[in-house]
Image (spheres, grey):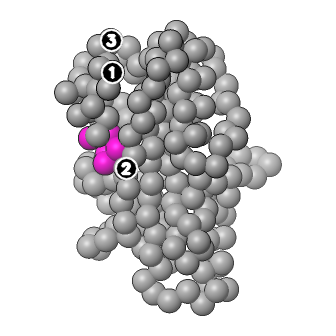
Amino acid sequence: MRRFDGDKLVIASHNAGKLREIAELLTPFGVTVSSAADHGLDEPEETESTFAGNARIKAHFAAKGSGLPALSDDSGISVEALDGAPGVYTADWAETETGRDFTLAMTKVWNLLEEKGAPAPRKAAFNCTLCLAWPDGHDEIFEGRVAGQVVWPMRGERGFGFDPVFLPAGESETFGEMDPAKKNAMSHRNDAFVKLVKGCFA
């Protein structure tokens, strides 16, 4: 496994919430973080059907475009009663003509669960795949997961994406209600990040 020995890293995302979370996670390692947008890079088309596939597309695109190592994150929520949907297409479910609307996406998921008469608890998991790619084409992949359930109505305004309807197993607060530090310590992103740190930074 390749070690990260630089001090600059591009985060291959235009999602402000993800950028904030990842920047905080990288703080202890003295790494200067910039975003793909800071380098004038657009978002590449995500054409794969797996989290790892799409993470690779984004990381390699940013690494090649910036000339720096790049870290991408492909994540989503998989709902058991919906056969794992929306999964890798989580962001697509939020797409509208005027941008992403996750309230719309969360409502769609709940309505589908209601239509199916899915029994409670309506089990779900957040998945995250991180890809660290270098300009020479090498990459490392790390996967994280946190289990829980989908709840309704939406609760909390502290998170982003599907956080207001995701109740982690054993918790009484959704990710949308939870203190960001607590959420970051137990999230799917942190699970993947711990593996990244152990593999490439520690």
Q: Which amino acid does label 1 sit on?
A: Arg
- Circle 2: is it few (<14), some (14-19), or many (20+) Cα within 10 Å? many
Element class at badge 2: strand
Pick whichever of labels 2 and 3 is earlier in the sequence: 3
Answer whether residue 31 is visible to the viewer in this image: no
Mark 1 or 3, closer to the camera: 1
- The structure residue drawn at horizontal position 25% and vertical position 18%, both measured from the top left corner, is 30
Question: What distance separates the C-alpha of mark 2 from that of mark 3?
Answer: 24 Å
Q: In which quarter of the image is residue 3?
A: top left
Mark 1 or 2, closer to the camera: 1
Question: What distance separates the C-alpha of mark 1 from that of mark 2?
Answer: 19 Å
Q: Residue 46 carries which label?
A: none
32 on left or right of 117: left
What residue sits right under mark 2 in the picture?
144
Q: Residue 2 carries which label?
A: 1
Element class at badge 1: loop
State the residue in front, 39 or 196.
Answer: 196
What residue sits right under mark 3 in the picture?
6
161 on left or right of 172: right
Mark 2 and mark 3 residues within 8 Å of each other at the beta carbon: no
Q: Pinpoint residue 11: horizontal percent, then vertical percent.
A: 47, 27
Q: What residue type is labelled 3?
A: Gly
The residue segment tinted magenta is: 189-194
Q: Is residue 4 magenta?
A: no
